Image (tube, helix red, strand yellow):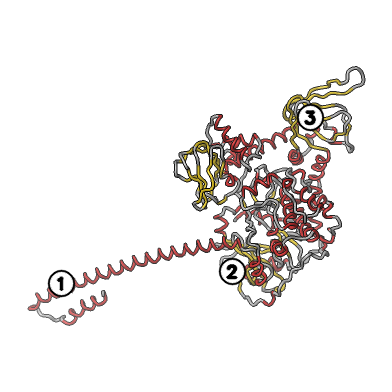
Amino acid sequence: MLSRALIHSKDPLTQFGSIDTSDQDSHNACGMGTLRDLQYALQLKIEELRQRDTLIDELELELDTKDELIRRLQDELDRYRTTVSLPGPSAASAATSAQNEDKRRPKRQTVVSESFSPGPATLSMGSHRSCDKKQESERLIQTAFLKNDLLKHLSEEEIRAVTACMYRSTINQGCFVIQEGTVGDQAYVLEEGRLDVTKAGQKLLTVEPEDMFGEPALLYSCTHACSVSAQTDSRLWVIDRQSYRAALIQCGLRRLAHSVELLRSLPFLQSLPDDVIMKMSDHMKETNYTDGDCIIRQGATGDTLYIITKGQVTVTEQRPGPEEKVVLTELFERQWFGEKALWGEDIQVQTGNVVASGEVTCLLINQETFKDVIDGLACDCQQDVQKYNKSNVESGEDPALLASSTLSDFQILCTVGFGEFGHVDLVRLRSNITHFFAMRVLKKKLIVNSSQQEHIRREGRILMDVPAHCPFIVSLHKAFRDAEQLYILTEACLGGDLSALLKEKGFMEDCSARFYTACVAEALAFLHSQGVVYRDVKPENVLLDQRGYAKLIGSRCMKKVERGQRTWTFCGTLGYMAPEILLNKGHGVCADLWSLGVFVFELLSGGLPFDGSDPIKILSATIRGIDQIQFPETISKEAVGFIRRLCSNSPLERLGSQGNRAIQDIQKHKWFEGFNWDGLYKRTLIPPVVPKVENLLESTTCAFYSEDSVEPFTNWDDF
């Protein structure tokens, strides 16, 4: 329109350029008309451009909305793929396996709660919302705890500490305390009123005063399965996850510091290094005595040191003559007896009686444990490293070629699995098509949104820093990164995971279960020798290589724990986690021994000892312990004994808990009688199942990774 207006405005001037003065009026009128036409045309054009700009803005907004929708759907797809089991060696066999999968068996996800460092800032967070409570309120809260299947196992000190952190909240009639499908981090104790618990609109039960609900949220970030709404105006006491954890950690650290202080005060232990004292304090057992209890009897044999932490004892001696007993002395809090038993080679004969005067609490450590602590911390942890360096590990990889490779050097053959943060590709080098690798492609955005950066860092640092290759752990070769993704290159295990094999078989015979348990035990022994706790033993995390040997995969639950120290993160898979993790007692490598026992139970029975659809039931059964579980008749007597020894509620009583002889204790158990451990190291044993790996050389896939903005990733602290 504007161009036409300009043409019309020029034509009269060109056509009538020689108009004489007699036509001036008509010329002026024509000029005014032309100017008005131009102004009108310009306004039309401006309006047209404004409308186009508005339309473009609307289209760009719609496009942005659709892009965001696509991103959200892609994220949801990535998360949904976590429910897909890792395929076996071929796409066809994987599809068949998926179709035949037992649908009654729920997918078991790894739970990793927020990292929690027991520093001054985090340990003080429980007090900022707490408030003073009347005695009746404190009694009500403590009664609710003692009625609760999960929290009734806390000590009196721990219950008092958690109670002190709780704060009051009111809820009006008809309002929701918890809504189904939401994620929470709080638990509640009802003090006044009544609450309705509903699921999908159907009422399940009524919450009465002194009832507690929402307690799984104190352990990890879980989705609420039910809604809770106020039937009447109500008052509640509330505790959040961070405050709960801080209170329990404070209690644990106080107990640990107290026992360390007591040990350090003993003259005959002052020459021991700090790590030995810390480890010894971890192995001390607390025992309570009542008035008149004879703690040591004259003439009996003894091998135990006692340190009095509460009360007093009387030491007497039985002598010949008219006086049957002579009081030698009285010992009080922070004093000790029985110390001679620690140092001698022989068990000591007690020369007197030690009797409790009133209520008495002692810390105990026996001679065998004491020597194990001394010897274990002094032993050379490189023994296992050298053993694995000398083992006959087959490898077709060229270290120099791998070291110089870039991301674009790897050909993508197929996708073999999906995880919470991405997928796994089967790849090979262009220059060596006979050797295969696995490439984990992780989306940074999903990792960051789940606050899992620190756990991914730990896994990478641990696997890259181990001083030797363990044949029972999947090796990490190198890593790359770009703006959006991490690419982690590991060895490929083409036989699929042990979970798929277990689903196919239902359960395993002793000989098969022994083989896979031996592989996992060796992997754990290697990690423990490096001070690493694994925390997520389960069949899904055990892969089979092309020969059928089992290997532990890397896990974001892995963490290096200093000698004598503990870690506090709620981490692992429900049904496999040790009681000390669930109760926030602090844990170390002994937690893996519990999980190994559960692992053996599942291999031999096809199910878990602590299982169910309700997380509370799983958690409560775990805390009650293995002694409350009835074993299937298909599990042999020797295997039952092996599992019970691993799943002792006391971490220090578990088979393999003594660091310097952990794997030897497992090897010597009756269940492993006759097993060829040397053949396992040398890989001369024939595995129970040798996977049928399809000929991947016939693959016609020619996809490669883009090299745009990709760089090697060596410093995991930068992530």
Q: Amino acid at mark 3?
A: Trp
**Residue shown at the point (19%, 81%) measured from the top left:** 14
Relative horizontal placement of residue 33, taking residue 151 as reference (left or right): left
Where residue 571 sits: x, y (%)? 64, 50
The N terminus - image quarter:
bottom left
Relative horizontal placement of residue 103, taking residue 656 as reference (left or right): left
Q: Which residue is mark 3?
A: 336
Whether residue 406 is visible here, answered yes or no, is no
| Disc nearest the viewer among 1 and 2 | 2
Q: Is residue 305 above or below residue 568?
A: above
Q: Secondary structure at mark 1?
A: helix
Of all residues, the one furthest to the right in this rendering is 320
Mark on residue 707? Answer: 2
Tell me, yes or no, whether the two marked residues, 1 and 2, touch with CB atoms within 8 Å: no
Where residue 433 sits: x, y (%)? 70, 74
Where residue 43 sits: x, y (%)? 24, 68
Report the front residue among 629 and 182: 629
* Between discs 2 and 3, the one toward the N terminus: 3
Q: Amino acid at mark 2?
A: Glu
- Rounded to the nearest whole Å, what is the CA distance between mark 2 and mark 3? 68 Å
Q: Amino acid at mark 1?
A: Met
* Between discs 1 and 3, the one toward the N terminus: 1
| Disc nearest the viewer among 1 and 3 | 3
Where residue 691 sits: x, y (%)? 74, 68
- Rounded to the nearest whole Å, what is the CA distance between mark 1 and mark 2? 66 Å
Q: Which residue is mark 1?
A: 32
Report the front residue among 586 and 628: 628
**Residue shown at the point (56%, 45%) measured from the top left:** 214
